[in-house]
Amino acid sequence: MAKICETRKARVINMSKKVSIKWLGKPEEHDFPAALSYLSLIYDATTAAGLVNKLKKAAVAEFKAKDIFRASALPLLGVINSHVKKDQQKIMSGSEVSPLLLIRDPANGKVVIADGYHRLCAVYSFDEDAVIPCKIA
């Protein structure tokens, strides 16, 4: 039982540790094809391509991690997810991470995370109030 408590305590200490998150000024080029791939599952090809073009032209805005989660209605992925863990390690090493790509979906009353879901989960694990740069269309 003590071992379980120690493990939980270690996780809490790690998660509450303030980490400085560094952001790139704009999304990386490979983020847009990734967004297109995901959006093509939700929308027809023409709509998905049009949304990606809007994302490319959009200015960078900032939103809190917790608000993006609420607007997307997605669950928080934990460190068990290898992509989240990789993004956490990238953040802890001081590497810059790419802004998120978001789509407003008023018909469903949500925000679609076109690219950056794992980055969002990684950032949230450090600070739910972290301000995240995003392109939103």
Image (cartoon, grey):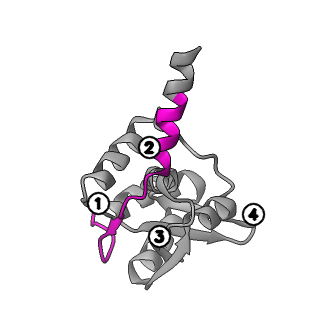
| Lower sequence index among marks 3 and 1 | 1
Residue 113 falls left or right of residue 27: right
Mark 1 lies on a secondary structure that is: loop
The residue sitting at 35% across, 64% down in the picture is 20
Classed neighbour count for the residue bearing mark 2: other residues with Cα under 10 Å, few (<14), some (14–19), many (≥20)? few
Instruction: Write the start and end of the magenta stretch as one range.
Output: 8-29
x and y percentages locating residue 70 in the rendered image: 68, 61
Residue 100 found in image quarter: bottom left
Q: Which mark is residue 132?
A: 3
Q: Is residue 16 magenta?
A: yes
Q: Is residue 35 magenta?
A: no
Name above or below for residue 46 compared with residue 127: below
Distance from the alpha carbon under mark 4 to that under mark 3: 23 Å
Mark 2 lies on a secondary structure that is: helix
| Lower sequence index among marks 1 and 2 | 2
Residue 109 found in image quarter: bottom right
Name above or below for residue 11 compared with residue 3: below
* Nearer to us: label 1 or label 2: 2
Distance from the alpha carbon under mark 3 to that under mark 1: 19 Å
Distance from the alpha carbon under mark 4 to that under mark 2: 36 Å
To which residue does mark 4 refer? Answer: 108
The residue sitting at 37% across, 48% down in the picture is 88
Amino acid carrying mark 1 in the image: His
| Lower sequence index among marks 3 and 2 | 2
107 or 102, nearer to the observer:
102
Quadrant (top left, top right, bottom left, bottom right) of the N terminus: top right
To which residue does mark 1 refer? Answer: 30
x and y percentages locating residue 89 in the rendered image: 31, 46
Circle 3/circle 1 CB separation < 8 Å? no
